[in-house]
Image (cartoon, helix red, strand yellow):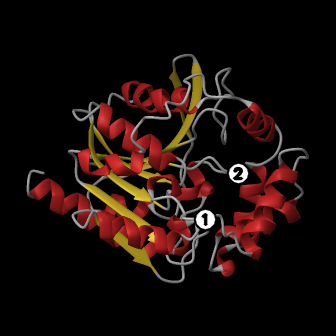
C-alpha cells in the first residue's frame, strides 16, 4: 500500500532560521532521504518508500530542501547552500550520523558529503544521478529527451498548468499508472506558487564557487568514498543512463551498480520494490560487516 501525504504528519524544525518541513517513520539508525532538484520535487517523492525502511528497523526521514515543498525559500539558491543545509538539518534533529538515500541531483550532493564528512555520513545510496556517470561520447538526445527539455525550458518562464505537471511526470516515469489523481494534485501543488518562484530563482542563479577545469570529475572519485556505496539506475532513464552506468561498472568493477528494467528517472516510484529491497539489504549488510 502506498503511503500518502495525509497518512504521515508534517513536522517542522528551524534550521538556521529556515522553517523546514519533514516527515518520518520508524525507529533505529537514521536514513535521510534527499529529493532531486526538478520542479515539484519534495519529500513526498519518498512517501511510498518510508514504510519499508521503517519496517526494516530504520528511522526513515524525508525532508523538503530549501525552496522546495513546504520549506522556506532561501536567499541563497546555490547547490553549496543546499548541501550545507543537509548537515544543519541533521544537527537540528540531533542526528550525529545518518545514511543518505539521494535521488537525481541530490546524488552528487550526497557523494560530496560522503567525501567531506566520513564521520557523519554512514552510507550512501544513489538513485538515478546522471552527473555521477561517465559523460556521453556525443550529445544524442532522442525525441523524448528533446521534448522534455523543451517543456522544462517553457516551465522556467511560465508557471506550469496541471497538464504540464502530468507531462513532466510522464517523461520521468515508465509506469504512468502511478500518476493517480492524488499524486498529480500533490505534485502540482509542489510546482506552483512559492515553489515555482524558487525554481525560477534556482534556474537563474549561479553557484558562487567557480568551476576548476582541472578538477577531477566527481564520478571518477566514487572509489574514494570510504562509506558503503550503492548506485541504482533505471535502464530506460534519459541521457543514455544504461550505457553510461554500464561503462562506469566496466571502469570501476568494485562499485555496487544495479540497473533496473522498466524504470526511468523517477527511480523511487518506478523501481519501488527494488529500491526498498536493495537498499535495506545494503544498509543491514554493510552495518553487520562493520563497513
* Left or right, residue 63 beside residue 205: left
Q: Is residue 275 visible?
A: no
In the image, residue 286 above or below residue 226: below
* Left or right, residue 45 beside residue 283: right
Q: Residues within 10 Å of mark 1 (few under 14, many from 20)?
A: few
Please name the residue shown 88% across and 47% down the image.
159
In the image, residue 47 above or below residue 177: above
Please name the residue shown 67% across and 34% down the image.
67
In the image, residue 30 above or below residue 184: above
Mark 1 lies on residue: 138
How many badges with numbers are in the image?
A: 2
Depth order, front residue of 198/53 = 198
Q: CA distance from mark 2 to mark 1?
A: 30 Å
Please name the residue shown 29% across and 53% down the image.
58
* Left or right, residue 79 beside residue 55: right
Mark 2 lies on residue: 40
Q: Earlier in the sequence, mark 2 or mark 1?
A: 2
Instruction: Verify CB contact (< 8 Å) between mark 2 and mark 1.
Output: no
* Left or right, residue 282 beside residue 72: left
Q: Quadrant of residue 78?
A: top right
Q: Is residue 228 visible?
A: yes
In x, y percent, where is residue 261?
48, 83
Secondary structure under tag 2 reads loop
In x, y percent, where is residue 123?
27, 49
Depth order, front residue of 108/75 = 108
In x, y percent, where is residue 276?
38, 68
Please name the residue shown 57% across and 77% down the image.
236
Amino acid at each position: 500500500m502506498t503511503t500518502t501525504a495525509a497518512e504521515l504528519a508534517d513536522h517542522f524544525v528551524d534550521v538556521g532560521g529556515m522553517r523546514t518541513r519533514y516527515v518520518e517513520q520508524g525507529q533505529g539508525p537514521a536514513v535521510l532521504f534527499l529529493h532531486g532538484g526538478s520542479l515539484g520535487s519534495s519529500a513526498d517523492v519518498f512517501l511510498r518508500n518510508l514504510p519499508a525502511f521503517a519496517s526494516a528497523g530504520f528511522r526513515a526521514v524525508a525532508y523538503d530542501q530549501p525552496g522546495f515543498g513546504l520549506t522556506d525559500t532561501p536567499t541563497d539558491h546555490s547547490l553549496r547552500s543546499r548541501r550545507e543545509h543537509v548537515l544543519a538539518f541533521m544537527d537540528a534533529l540531533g542526528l550525529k550520523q545518518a545514511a543518505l538515500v539521494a535521488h537525481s541531483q541530490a546524488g552528487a550532493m550526497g557523494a560530496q558529503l560522503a567525501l567531506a564528512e566520513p564521520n557523519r555520513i554512514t552510507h550512501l545510496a544513489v538513485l538515478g544521478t546522471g552527473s555521477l556517470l561517465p559523460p556521453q561520447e556525443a550529445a544524442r538526445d532522442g525525441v523524448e529527451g528533446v521534448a522534455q527539455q523543451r517543456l522544462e525550458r517553457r516551465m522556467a518562464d511560465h508557471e506550469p498548468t496541471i497538464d504540464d505537471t502530468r507531462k513532466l511526470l510522464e517523461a520521468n516515469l515508465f509506469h504512468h499508472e502511478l500518476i493517480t489523481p492524488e499524486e498529480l494534485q500533490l505534485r502540482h501543488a509542489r510546482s506552483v506558487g512559492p515553489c515555482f518562484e524558487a525554481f525560477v530563482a534556482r534556474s537563474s542563479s549561479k553557484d558562487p564557487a567557480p568551476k576548476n577545469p582541472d578538477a577531477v570529475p566527481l564520478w571518477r572519485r566514487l572509489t574514494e568514498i570510504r562509506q558503503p556505496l550503492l548506485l541504482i539506475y533505471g535502464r530506460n532513464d534519459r541521457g543514455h543512463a544504461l550505457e553510461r552506468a554500464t561503462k562506469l561498472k566496466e571502469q570501476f568493477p568494485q562499485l555496487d551498480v544495479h540497473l533496473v528494467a522498466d524504470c526511468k528517472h523517477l527511480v523511487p516510484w518506478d523501481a519501488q520494490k527494488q529500491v526498498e529491497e536493495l537498499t535495506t539489504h545494503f544498509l543491514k549488510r554493510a552495518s553487520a560487516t562493520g563497513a
